[in-house]
Image (spheres, rainbow, N blue to C red):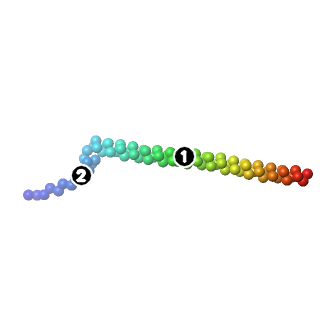
């Protein structure tokens, strides 16, 4: 009597329908992850724009202060 060696196989390799369903689930999970990363990138870009506006406002404020102080000092001497 011979012994038949039967290895348990993954059902995905045997049944095409199961394979298709699992592939769809994997694709949806990957798509969710990609969308989450895209949202994070968009949020980061919005923060960068806000930071640039804030820095430009600070530069304009400092420049205005310097010009005003200079004009004030010039006005005192004349």
Q: Residues within 10 Å of mark 2 (few under 14, many from 20)?
A: few
Residue on which the image places disc 2: 9
Q: Seen from this angle, which residue lies furthest bottom? A: 2
Q: Which residue is found at the position 74% from the left and 51% from the top?
A: 62
- Residue at image position (73%, 49%) is 61
Mark 1 vs 2: CB contact within 8 A: no
Q: Position of residue 34 (x, y in %)?
A: 45, 46
The percent position of residue 31, horizontal first and vertical second, equals 42, 44
Q: Secondary structure at mark 2?
A: loop
> Badge 1 is on which residue?
43
Q: Earlier in the sequence, mark 1 or mark 2?
A: 2
Rendering coords of residue 65 (x, y %): 77, 51
The quadrant of the image that shows the N terminus is bottom left
Instruction: Give the numbered dot on residue 16.
Output: none
Q: Residue furthest right?
A: 78
Disc 1 crowd rating (10 Å Cα; few below 14, some 14-19, many 20+) is: few
Residue at position x 78%, y 52% in the image: 66
6 left or right, relative to 27: left
Disc nearest the viewer among 1 and 2: 1
Front in this rendered view, residue 22 or 36 = 36
Front one among 69 and 33? 69
Give the side of residue 29 with respect to residue 66, left or right. Answer: left
Q: Total label count?
A: 2
SS state under label 1:
helix
Whole-number angstrom distance, CA of label 1 to CA of label 2: 45 Å
Q: Nearer the viewer, residue 18 or 4?
A: 18
Q: Residue furthest left?
A: 1
* Residue at the image point whose x is 52% and y is 48% from the top: 41
């Amino acid at each position: 009597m011979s012994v038949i060696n039967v290895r348990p196989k993954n059902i995905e390799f045997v049944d095409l329908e199961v394979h298709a369903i699992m592939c769809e689930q994997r694709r949806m999970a990957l798509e969710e992850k990609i969308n989450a990363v895209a949202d994070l990138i968009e949020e980061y870009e919005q923060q960068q724009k806000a930071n640039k506006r804030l820095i430009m406002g600070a530069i304009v404020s400092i420049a205005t202060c310097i010009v005003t102080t200079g004009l004030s000092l010039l006005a005192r001497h004349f």
